[in-house]
Image: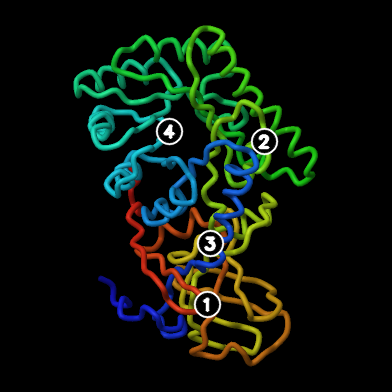
Amino acid sequence: MTAQDNMIGRPIQDLDTPVLLVDLDKLERNIAKMRQVIIVECGIGWRPHTKSMKTPALAHILLQAGAHGVTCAKLGEAEVMAAAGIRDILIANQVVGAGKLARLVHLCRHADVIVAVDCEAHVQALAAAAQAAGTRPRVVVEVNIAMNRAGVEPGEPVVTLAKQVASCQSLRFAGLMGWEGGRLAAIQDPDEKRRTIEAAVSLLTASADRCRAAGLPVAIVSCGGTGTHWITAKIPGVTEVQAGGGIFCDVHYRRDYGVEHEYALTVLTTVVSRPTPTRIICDAGWKTMGQQPAPPEPLGVGEVKSLRLSAEHATIELVAPRSTPAVGDQVEFVAGYCDSTVFLHDHLYGVREGRLEVIWPILGRGKLR
């Protein structure tokens, strides 16, 4: 129960600020657009990443829209999703350490969990933990196709590691995953972006073909984020994409990655000071709105010269003087990046046509382990 629960049905102008909002009509249109591209047009699976939304209620909405499972960044996030009744969960990361491995293999009693590995040490430790618990997690081999972060190199190293997974009685080899990376998503020329992404993802699909040629069944070939999904989903051999943040969209996705979705995620603030005709001070700073890799954008205030966030304030400098918004008025900010904004809040307030419809707890907040 929150202090604003009794505000359901009331206009957002009655809400205490700062508060994280999602426009439900825009959210639903973004979901429908992603579903159309991934599931309807391309005929592959959709496993949206929950690292941005961190909200089981939203994950269930995506499952109802046709997603077959979810992707999580951390084991703690996967535990939250499993507790909410979600079964098919990919942890797109390596899980390391005896304590985490014990949690992972016991979680397999409550959900069908998939976890990534990229070296023999991962395989051995995971297999031992699963054998001790009497469970058999699914495993994907992570392949380094462009990110140069985690992942085994494409080709024969993938086959070698996949054989090691398949040889473990306590593990189930499920396939491969990779991430073509933000660097490729940020390529501005559409043709170059498509060619570069296709080349990177072909390293993943070719590795899957080599595994199959070696007698290893590859059910999953997983990749694709919000900034690449409309290209990646069309590449032969890809079985699912992990794009999730596009249901919100934000300044970063639109400005840097060319995502043509509606801005659904905003932060509602109140003007607390107007020291000069060109300066607006709002009651939300970087403790409320993430500013990396893109700053938030204020709506309806006129042409902005600059925006500066301190801990609890946003300072907007306007190009030209104006009397509105005045002290006490509200200003909405489009999220600069949903990943760096949602996790700052306890609740997500769903609004429709300017009225509060639902309040969702952000249960994945703080699940860093």
Q: Mark 3 = which residue? A: 27
Decide which of tag 2 and tag 4 comes sooner along the chain: 4
Q: What x and y, as percent, mark residue 139? A: 40, 24
Decide which of tag 3 and tag 1 comes sooner along the chain: 3
Do residues under tags 2 and 1 come within 8 Å of each other at their CB atoms?
no
Return the residue nearer the eye: 10 or 307. 10
Return the residue nearer the eye: 283 or 225. 225
Q: What x and y, as percent, mark residue 112? A: 33, 33
Q: What x and y, as percent, mark residue 80? A: 30, 47
Residue positioned 63% across, 38% down in the render: 42
Q: Is residue 309 above or below residue 73?
A: below
What secondary structure is marked by label 4? loop
Residue positioned 73% across, 84% down in the render: 320
Could you tell me the amino acid type at mark 1? Glu
Q: Mark 2 = which residue? A: 234
Q: Mark 1 = which residue? A: 353
